[in-house]
Image (tube, rainbow, N blue to C red):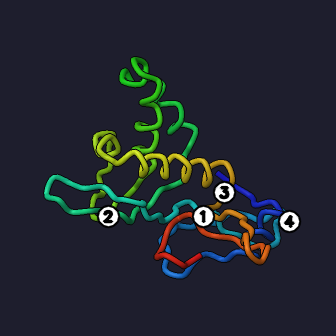
Amino acid sequence: MRRTMPDRTRQAAQQFPDAPGQDHTQVPAESAGGAGRDTLRTEFAFELPRGYVDESGTVHRHGVMRLATARDELIPLRDDRVRENSAYLSVVLIARVITRLGTVEDVHAGIVEDLFASDLAFLQDFYRRINAEGHTRAAVTCPSCQEHFAVDLAGGRLGES
């Protein structure tokens, strides 16, 4: 499958380079002009606001979410749990696209069910951002000085953007 990045998307990506140390996979894609090669970022690192607490009490906050495919969005519609309760769709969908959560590499709907509500809301917004908008950055304005800048919603330590 060949994917291209529009010029305006490429320019926006150059304005806000990825934060150092973030995990992501890039797939080669031919540029719109065909002359050069660009990369398509397919995985995005995140940090949960609270974290998933496993059965041993370990808190897992850092994870990786991949871009969703059409299949990822279609298969949950056939799931009996989703047919019985349409609100369960986001649980199944999020479980399909999270590739790692802390040391947990087999993320399934049961794990997503056990997340705190604030973490699920974060992941739903994160999913929407990377799949609809193509990035995890949000443009913000400082209320004091009116300076415009971008923050990365993927997480990090307090005060980092």
Quarter of the image containing the C terminus?
A: bottom right
Sequence order check: which comes first, mark 3 or mark 2?
A: 2
Which residue was labeled with disc 2? 102
What whole-number distance in Å separates the C-alpha atoms at marks 2 and 1? 21 Å
Residue in the image at 56% along x and 43% along y = 69
Sequence order check: which comes first, mark 2 or mark 1?
A: 1
Residue in the image at 42% along x and 52% along y = 119
Horizontally, is 101 left or right of 149 in the view? left
Horizontally, is 37 left or right of 59 in the view? right
For badge 3, the amino acid type reads Gly
Which one is in front in this view, the residue at disc 3 or the one at disc 4? 3
Sequence order check: which comes first, mark 3 or mark 4?
A: 4
Q: Which mark is residue 41?
A: 1
Asked if the residue under mark 4 is in contact with the one under mark 2, i.e. CB atoms within 8 Å, the reply is no
SS type, badge 4: loop
Looking at the image, the residue that sits furthest to the front is 144
Residue in the image at 35% along x and 44% along y = 112
SS type, badge 2: loop
Which one is in front in this view, the residue at disc 4 or the one at disc 1? 1
For badge 2, the amino acid type reads Gly
Q: Name the quadrant containing residue 48.
A: bottom left
List x then y, in percent, for residue 38: 71, 70
Horizontally, is 32 left or right of 139 in the view? right
Which one is in front in this view, the residue at disc 3 or the one at disc 1? 3
Q: Name the quadrant containing residue 130.
A: bottom right
Asked if the residue under mark 1 is in contact with the one under mark 4, i.e. CB atoms within 8 Å, the reply is no
What whole-number distance in Å separates the C-alpha atoms at marks 4 and 1? 19 Å
Which residue was labeled with disc 4? 33
Q: Which mark is residue 134?
A: 3
For badge 1, the amino acid type reads Arg
For badge 4, the amino acid type reads Gly
What whole-number distance in Å separates the C-alpha atoms at marks 3 and 4? 20 Å
